[in-house]
Amino acid sequence: MPTFSELSRAAYCPRQLYYARKHDDEGPPASVENTQQLAFRYRELREADNETLAALPIERSPAAYREALESLSTRPIWEDLCEPVETDYYVEGKDCAGLLHKILGGELPTPTLISPGNPPENGVWKPQTVRAVAAAKALAWERNEEIPRTLIEYPAVGVVREVPLTTRRTATYRRVLRTVRAMDGPPPRVNDSRCDSCEYRTECGVSTRSLKSLLGL
């Protein structure tokens, strides 16, 4: 059964997932965990001084970070974000399984995932969309009730984005799920900008362009 993180990685690049599985590379580095822990300190950090915030892995100035948390505190989800009903909750659905960083209370439970990075200008990144749908589907299967949305937290910048389960997002999730299930060898190389920062690019054998070719010489 694929995990949420495997589906997210496959949504970015199926071949990258192949090499990650080959090397049993699943867990995040310590730096990721340090950033994710900020999501459990919102109340404290909203009132923190400049010196305290400057020593943390945040991606904004202390003043801008406090302002972001102040804005977040005006949303109806604030209290639940600060006091979730569950944390680090492992859920196993019909098609996938993984860790929910939080489950928020309310009329319907809301699964929440914490990202160590920055969000795009609008919405969330495509791999995170797939992961969000996977999380909602798994929790819905376990609880036998509809889960209409997942939240993605970006604690390094004090932003929380909602991912409603639309027909298009669900279709993308199912397409990625089929790709992962069918994987029995290295998928085709993508050979595009995604390769530049990929840790497996050397082993993958993706072609790279020389400086001369980039300059048109």
Image (cartoon, rainbow, N blue to C red):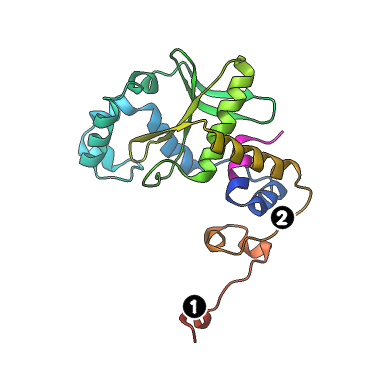
Q: Quickly name the residue at label 1.
A: 214
Q: How many marks?
A: 2
* Residue 187 tag number: 2
Residue 152 at x, y = what percent?
45, 34
Q: Toward which corner of the image does residue 34 lie, by quadrant? A: top left
Relative image position of residue 26 (x, y in whole percent): 62, 42
Mark 1: few/some/many CA within 10 Å (<14, 14-19, 20+): few
Residue 25, given in percent of the width and then of the height, sits at 64, 46
Residue 27 lies, in percent from the top left, at: 59, 40
Q: Is residue 216 above or below residue 61?
A: below
Q: Which residues are magenta?
A: 1-9
- Taking the magenta stretch, the answer to whether it contains residue 38 is no
**Left or right: 9 with respect to 118?**
right
Q: Looking at this rendering, what residue extends furthest in the front direction? A: 167
As rendered, which of 188 and 165 lies closer to the eye? 165
Q: Is residue 138 above or below residue 64?
A: above
Q: Quadrant of the N terminus?
A: top right
